[in-house]
Image (cartoon, rainbow, N blue to C red):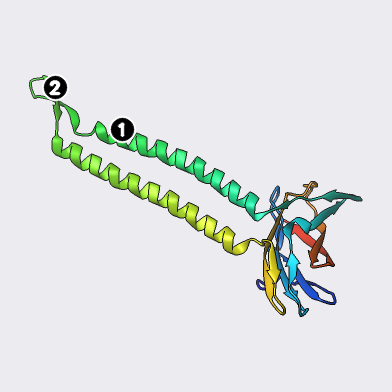
């Protein structure tokens, strides 16, 4: 656990769980993200399943169940974002190409006051070549950003896993935004099941600007 964040520890007979907020502060309407680390202390493999994680927010004397945002959900969100980005990139590329297709055309006025039009194949070729380079760069950047985001999700987000004896495993646990969005510290109860053991951790997180 890094970044100066204290880790909350739950130890039972065959497993150890550490939890801390990924950030000291929760941005308004943001998703709480927690870093979870699990250690199998037993001599047998144990299972961790994201579907068995439970989370509850405590606010104003009431409890609100919080949905776990799974890796699969985050991947689908990223795919949807990539589709939207591809559409916008395609529109921008189309506009760029259309603008370039008009290049090389111009008007002139003679000293005598006559006006006319002209066309420069060289100017048109230069503009279209520049547009093609710019479009290729935009499309490549969109693809690279999507691939990078997917790789980050794969590496960072916690997933179902079977832990071998003495093995550590962990990642980011994403939760749906809190029901209570008032500007006060948030308190959560997170229950993480490892094998047959339930680890109950109480976590507090300050609001943005605190």
Q: Position of residue 66 (x, y in %)?
A: 79, 51
Residue 116 is tagged as 2
| Mark nearer the viewer, 1 or 2 | 1
Element type where label 2 sits in the image: strand
Element type where label 1 sits in the image: helix
- In this rendering, the answer to whether 106 lies above or below 9 is above
Q: Quadrant of the C terminus?
A: bottom right
Choose top left, top right, bottom left or bottom right for residue 10. Answer: bottom right
Residue drawn at 67 percent across, 61 percent down: 159
Choose top left, top right, bottom left or bottom right for residue 195. Answer: bottom right
Residue drawn at 69 percent across, 62 percent down: 160
First in residue order: circle 1 vs circle 2: 1
Q: Position of residue 165 (x, y in %)?
A: 72, 78
Residue 98 is tagged as 1
Q: Disc 1 and disc 2: Cα gap in Å?
A: 23 Å
Specify whether 162 is left or right of 151: right
Specify whether 179 is left or right of 95: right
Q: Position of residue 25 (x, y in %)?
A: 71, 59
């Amino acid at each position: 656990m890094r970044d100066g964040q204290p880790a909350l520890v739950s130890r039972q007979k065959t497993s150890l769980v550490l939890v801390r907020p990924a950030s000291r502060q929760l941005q308004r309407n943001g998703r709480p993200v927690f870093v979870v680390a699990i250690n199998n202390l037993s001599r047998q493999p144990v299972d961790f399943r994201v579907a068995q994680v439970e989370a509850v927010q405590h606010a104003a004397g009431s409890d609100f169940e919080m949905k776990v945002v799974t890796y699969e959900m985050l991947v689908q969100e990223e795919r949807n974002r990539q589709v939207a980005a591809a559409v916008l990139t395609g529109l921008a590329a189309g506009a760029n190409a259309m603008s370039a297709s008009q290049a090389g055309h111009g008007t002139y006025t003679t000293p005598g006051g006559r006006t006319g039009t002209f066309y420069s194949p060289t100017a048109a070729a230069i503009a279209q070549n520049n547009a093609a380079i710019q479009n290729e760069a935009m499309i490549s950047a969109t693809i690279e950003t999507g691939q990078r985001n997917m790789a980050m999700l794969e590496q960072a987000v916690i997933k179902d896993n079977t832990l071998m004896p003495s093995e550590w495993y962990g990642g980011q646990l994403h939760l749906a935004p809190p029901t209570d969005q008032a500007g006060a510290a948030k308190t959560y109860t997170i229950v993480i099941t490892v094998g047959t053991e339930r680890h109950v951790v109480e976590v507090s997180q300050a609001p943005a600007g605190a």
